Amino acid sequence: MEILEERFGKILVEVVNSDRATLNEAARFKPTINQRIDEGFRYFIIDLSDCDFIDSTFLGVLVHSLKRIRRREGQMRLIGFKPPVKSMFELTRMDKVFKIHETVEEALSQIQNEENI
C-alpha cells in the first residue's frame, strides 16, 4: 500500500492506494496520519476510492484518527466508496459517524465553506 498526499491549503488529502485496507495497511496508515495531526493539520479528506474492501482494523484507525482530529477542532471527510466499502460503513453504522462525500471537490467545498478557509 502506498499513501499519496495532496495539500489544498490547510486541507490534506490522504489517498489510500490499495484495493484492500486491512491490518497491514492500518499499520502503515496510522503513523502517517498521526504524524500529520502532530504537525498541526486539522482538516483531512481520506480517499478510499481504490479500496474494494476495508476491515475492522483499518476502520478502527479511521475512528481513532477522527477522535484526535475532533479534539483539535478539525474535520475528517471520507470519499470514494465502492459498494462493498459503503456496505461495511452502513452495517457498522459508521456512515452516521463520518461525513462521506463522492468527490474530493465536494469534500473540499464543504470544509472550506464550514470553516471559512
Image: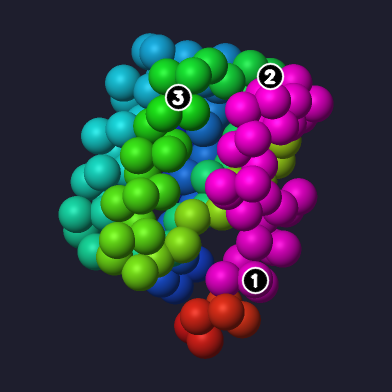
Using the image, tell me which numbered label, if any, was put on residue 110.
Answer: 1
Q: Secondary structure at mark 2?
A: loop
Front in this rendered view, residue 60 or 25? 60
Q: Which tag is nearer the camera, tag 3 or tag 2? A: 3
Residue 37 in view of the camera: yes
Depicted 22 relative to depicted 91: above or below = above
Query: In the rendered structure, which amino acid carries the disc numbered 3?
Result: Phe
Q: Residues within 10 Å of mark 3 (few under 14, many from 20)?
A: many
Q: Which residue is mark 2?
A: 52
The crowding category of the residue bearing disc 1, from other C-alpha atoms within 10 Å (few below 14, some 14 to 19, many at least 20), is some
Task: Answer above or below: position of 2 versus 62.
Answer: above
Q: Earlier in the sequence, mark 3 or mark 1?
A: 3
Q: Residue at x 35, y 56 (%)?
A: 69
**Kind of residue indicated by mark 1:** Gln
Amino acid type, callout 2? Asp
Marks 3 and 1 sit apart, C-alpha to C-alpha, by 25 Å
Q: Which residues are magenta?
A: 82-111
| Circle number at residue 58 | 3
Judged left or right of residue 55, residue 85 is right
Q: Is residue 86 magenta?
A: yes
* Side (left or right) of 44 relative to 65: right
